[in-house]
Image: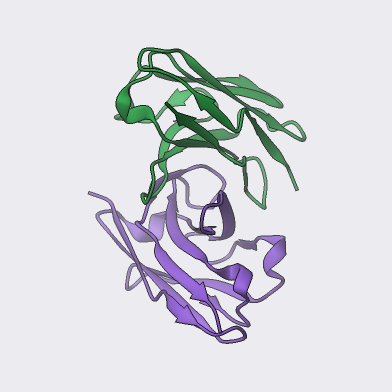
Chain colours: A purple, B green
Amino acid sequence: QVHLVESGGGVVQPGKSLRLSCAASGFTFSNHAMHWVRQAPGKGLEWVAVISYDEDNIYYADSLKGRFTISRDNSKNTLFLQMDSLRVEDTAVYYCARDVNDLGDSHFDYWGQGTLVTVSS
Amino acid sequence: DIQMTQSPSSVSASVGDRVTITCRASQGISTWLAWYQQKPGKAPKLLIYAASNLQSGVPSRFSGGGSGTDFTLTISSLQPEDFATYYCQQANSFPRTFGQGTKVEI
């Protein structure tokens, strides 16, 4: 069955960087677009970014202002999120989610369990 | 960006009640809308896609409707396992946006 497992979260100081990973299994990873969604403590869901199956189409939330970079390695069935210049307000659980389609223009049918990123001095 | 507004923010209900949650988009999104359920400490779960299509494995007491700017999620007979927070999300354009959530509680 479809399985998404995030890793790489932890405690980091403001201004530092962190790289999250999402290991996928149980489906043909290269056939699906993938998203990152985050949730600050006690808050709602916030979409972060999407990458199409072939990496040709990438979109980000406006609020990230170029600090985050989404990428993927289809040979390793892994999705990444490089987060630079982290801010306290980036503290959240980060989820990876599978798009039903290859271009990322549909809904999310599977989600990982999330990884917690805490930005604090 | 398309803003998604859910109402109410929370609703108190009992087992067996009929519950309806509404979601309004700031501009027309046809039927590009999904509903997710989230329980505390867990990842969201897809319930409804394309406004009214039930995801495989989701109980038939859940139903969705609407098009354009106004949408609804209805739970016909609330069960104990349905107490959770529900989010709508538009899939019409980027950036994807979610509603603020509706907490269904006792």
The answer to whether residue A69 is visible is: yes
Q: Position of residue A33 (x, y in %)?
A: 48, 56
The quarter of the picture where residue A60 lies is: bottom right
Q: Nearer the viewer, residue A25 or B11?
A: B11
Location of residue A45 with respect to B18 vertically, above or below: below
Q: Nearer the viewer, residue A12 or A38?
A: A12
Location of residue A89 with respect to B105 vertically, above or below: below
In what quadrant of the picture does the C terminus of chain A appear? bottom right
Q: Nearer the viewer, residue A59 or B2?
A: B2
Location of residue A5 with respect to A119 vertically, above or below: above
Residue at the image position 65 percent from the left and 40 percent from the top: B92
The answer to whether residue A81 is visible is: no
Residue at the image position 55 percent from the left and 26 percent from the top: B51
Locate residue A81 relative to residue A47 in the image: left or right.
Answer: left
The quarter of the picture where residue A23 lies is: bottom left
Q: How many marks?
A: 0
Q: Position of residue A103 (x, y in %)?
A: 54, 52
Locate residue A79 relative to residue A5 in the image: left or right.
Answer: right
Residue at the image position 42 percent from the left and 35 percent from the top: B84
Location of residue A12 with respect to A105 vertically, above or below: below
Q: Position of residue A14 (x, y in %)?
A: 60, 83
Q: Position of residue A64 (x, y in %)?
A: 67, 68
The quarter of the picture where residue A3 lies is: bottom left
